Amino acid sequence: MDVWYAAYGSNMHRERLGRYLAVCRDRTEPRVSRAVELGGVLYFATESAVWGGGRGFHDPDSDGRTFARAHLISAGQFSDIAALEMYREPGPGTELDLAEAVARGRLAFGPGRYETVVYAGELDGLPLLTFTAPWAVADVELRAPSEPYLRHLAAGLRESGAWTDHEIARYLADSPGAAGTWTETEVLGLLPAEASEGWDSSNQ
C-alpha cells in the first residue's frame, strides 16, 4: 500500500527526508513529491532536542491552512518515519494500522508528540496522511521555533517551488508560537538571497 506522507515540518526538505529513509527498512526514495495545503494550522510547541525551540505540529481542527509537501512512499516507510520521529528504531512492532486511521479520520497510536495519524483526504486516489500531537493548539503552551529550525522549514517550502518567499515568510511568521517573536521580514532574511521561483511542474 502506498500513501502520501504530508510533511509540514523539517521533512518537507528532500535532503532531510533522505536521512530518515536511509535508516528505514525500505530505503526507496519517494516516487514523487508535491506541494499541498492542509486544512488547519501549523503551530510551535514543546522543546526540540535537535533544533532547540518549539517543534512544529499540525492542528487539523483549527481554522487556517498548513503548507506541506506530500511525498509518495510506502505504508511501511510512513510507519518507520513516525517511529524515528519518536526516537525509536523502526522495525517489527512499529507498524501502524493506517487503514484504520483512514477509516476513522484520525487515530492516536500512543500519547507521543507524533503518534496521532491524521487522514487529510485523497490525492490521486491514495490516502494523504500526516502525523501530529494528540492535543490541540489551544491546549498546549506555545514555544517559539529556533532560527535554524525556521530556516530549514523555509528552505523546504521554497524547495517545493509552490510559494513565493514572501508567502513563506508570512506563513511562518504568522503561525502560533512564532507569531509575536518572529516577523515576516526576519523570516525572509533567513532564506538565501536568490530569486524566488514559481511552481515547477517537475516537482509533481
Image (tube, rainbow, N blue to C red):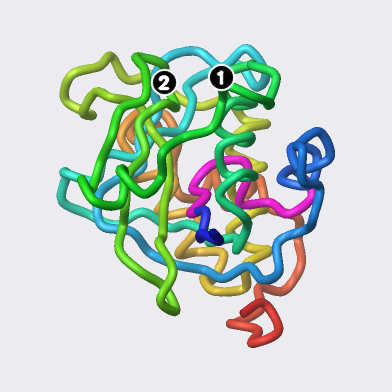
At a point 65% along the width and 84% down the height, the residue shown is 200
At a point 68% along the width and 31% down the height, the residue shown is 148
Is 80 placed left or right of 20 in the picture? left
**Image-quadrant location for residue 59:** top left
Name the quarter where the N terminus is drawn: bottom right
Which disc, if any, is residue 86? 1
- Residue 70: percent from left, percent from top: 53, 61
Asked if marks 2 and 1 touch (Cβ < 8 Å), the reply is: yes
- Residue 168: percent from left, percent from top: 50, 58
Q: Mark 1: which amino acid?
A: Met
**Image-quadrant location for residue 142:** top left
Mark 1 surroundings: few (<14), some (14-19) or many (≥20) residues within 10 A: few
Magenta range = 6-15
Name the quarter where the C terminus is drawn: bottom right
- Residue 54: percent from left, percent from top: 47, 21
Classify mark 2: helix, strand or loop: loop
Q: Mark 2: which amino acid?
A: Arg
Q: Is residue 195 above or below residue 102?
A: below
**Foreground pick, 66 / 28:** 28
Is 184 placed left or right of 50 in the picture? left
Classify mark 1: helix, strand or loop: loop
Say whether disc 2 or disc 1 marks the residue closer to the N-terminus: 1
At a point 64% along the width and 87% down the height, the residue shown is 201
Outermost residue to the bottom: 201
Which disc, if any, is residue 124? none
Residue that label 2 marks: 113
